[in-house]
Amino acid sequence: MASNSTWMTVVWERANKHGKWTPYAPEVSQLLEQSHRKNLNIASLGDADVNLKIYSVNLKDMVQVSEATGTKLPVRRRLCESNSVVLGRGFTWEWHGDSHDTWHPYDTDVNNFIENAFLQGVKFLNLSKSFPGYNYDIDLIKMLQMNRRTKHKRTIRRKQNISPYPVVKCPEEEEKNTEVESCVNGNYNALYSDLAQEIPGTASLIEQANRYMQSVIKATAPELPNNTVTLPSQTSGNGEINGTSVTIEMCSQNSNKLLENSNVGLNTTTTALVNGKPWREPWPPHTPESKLKPVPGIAPLPKYDKKAAKKKGLNDNDSIGPKNILELYTEKIEISPLSDSSNQTCIICCEMLSNPSSYDGDSTVLKLQLCSHMYHKACLQAMYDSGPKDKYLQCPTCKKIHGEKCGIQPPGNMIYHVLPYSLPGFPECDTIRIIYDIPSGVQGPEHPKPGKRYTARGFPRHCYLPDNEIGRKVLRLLVKAWQRRLIFTVGRSSTTGEENTVTWNEIHHKTEFGCNRRGHGYPDPNYFSNILAELEAHGVTDDEVYLWYPA
């Protein structure tokens, strides 16, 4: 095949009752595209989405058929340039339906229009100017759609897709009669040299990957000299998988001996593996629910019940109140003028412990039980009262947490399961996927601005851990942090600058599956030590003995 070809994103669409083309979800588009390539006549949509089990698509007549009513709707296969279609970037804009928890996607062109405006920082849109029949205004700050005639408002959301839309390689006009190279779910039998010529910027990305791998190798095996990373040539067979894998070659002649004799456990796998083949997308392919497995030894969390939470209260703990918080975690100390403690300073008020507190003149001194640092009682009480009063004390000197630290994370759901794929650097085990889903809502009394609405951008958010001992340990701690409302918080986004929105709470997650393009993927030799330290800083530690399950 000649090199003058383009990459196209495939979006399968159906006509709704108003005659507008609505895109199927990525996993449904993948199913239809695979059925199309296999020349199948019928595709059952329930194989991709159990909620669509009553529908099938006749690929010969290009219609969707309801098995319950016999209703038929036109279906089409739409090819879009990959650099222009927003759906291919992993986000879909949806509006809330009339029934509970029902969301409907905008059609492809409207989705592209809203997403591009959102990325450019536009706050308000009038869809009627660009799309006849769409008599709506869009408020991208409050995430609302308003009918310009009836003034009826609906909530909208920007949803991150679980799976990518399929991509195909299409030839130029003169090559349309030539058979197109086979590709499934975005995996291609193409060499890096071909990609560098056909996709702008790929060559520089390859150079960045080389530099990154050198730093990873040096961090994990500093005793290996002159480590370099090279890409296989077209004729190279060294570690090549379909001509696309990255291989690591050591310049030193004694490198093999050093590797054999070292105990660093260096793993040179730099790509995720899906069905034994490299996968370099930030998200994994669509996985049927039948292939998802529970995480061994970690029970799933119950689904959030809004009504039950209102009755119980998110932070109810009547046994620990503001008045007795100091009594629980401190003990009274008598300071003698002749003791060494009399020369110590209370770092809260900067007065000597032997002198009264500058807050109210009280000279009572308390010692924290876990770290033994001492302060004036009035100073500790003032420090606690000035905070969120969330029923724990944190030593201002060593940051040791006394009690159970709880945050102000809004309500939502945390789901986790095992995918039958491998992360970069962990070819020996499967992958744990965590899905966080928090809806927008109204701030409570514990939040910065009670009564004011907060937004929740980019949910559901997907994160990944290896399904091995350390991965399960981190997951167990993340579950504990989630239950204490510490994973997210409400405040100002450091990325967009938006106020009153749900943001990460200094516990870093890996949100890229098959690559590390934005620094949020694997391999990362320091990640587990970093996240364990971050969790410990929030008072979340693994102080129990668990039965570990083999990976």
Image: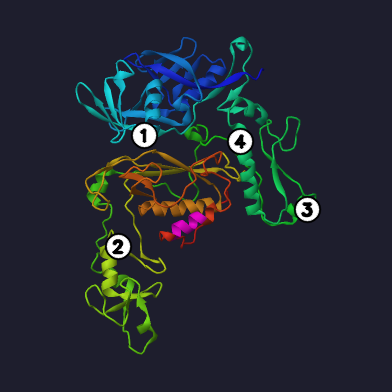
Q: Main secondary structure of the magenta part?
A: helix
**Contact, mark 4 vs mark 1 (Cβ under 8 Å):** no
Colour scheme in use: rainbow
Label 2 belongs to which residue?
Answer: 391
The CA distance from mark 1 to mark 2 is: 39 Å
Disc number for residue 257: 3
Left or right: where does residue 160 sit relative to residue 326? right
Disc number for residue 121: 1
**Above or below: residue 190 compared with residue 64:** below
Label 4 belongs to which residue?
Answer: 204
**Above or below: residue 460 compared with residue 471:** above
Left or right: where does residue 428 sit relative to residue 326? right
Callout 3: helix, strand or loop? Answer: helix
The CA distance from mark 4 to mark 1 is: 28 Å
The first of marks 2 and 3 along the sequence is: 3
Callout 1: helix, strand or loop? Answer: loop
Name the residue: 26% across, 20% down: 135
Tag 1: amino acid: Gly
The first of marks 2 and 4 along the sequence is: 4
On the image, the x and y values in percent for residue 437 come to: 37, 41
Name the residue: 26% across, 46% down: 443
Magenta stretch?
A: 530-536
The quarter of the picture where residue 269 lies is top right
Tag 4: amino acid: Ser
Single out the residue that lies furthest toward the left.
150
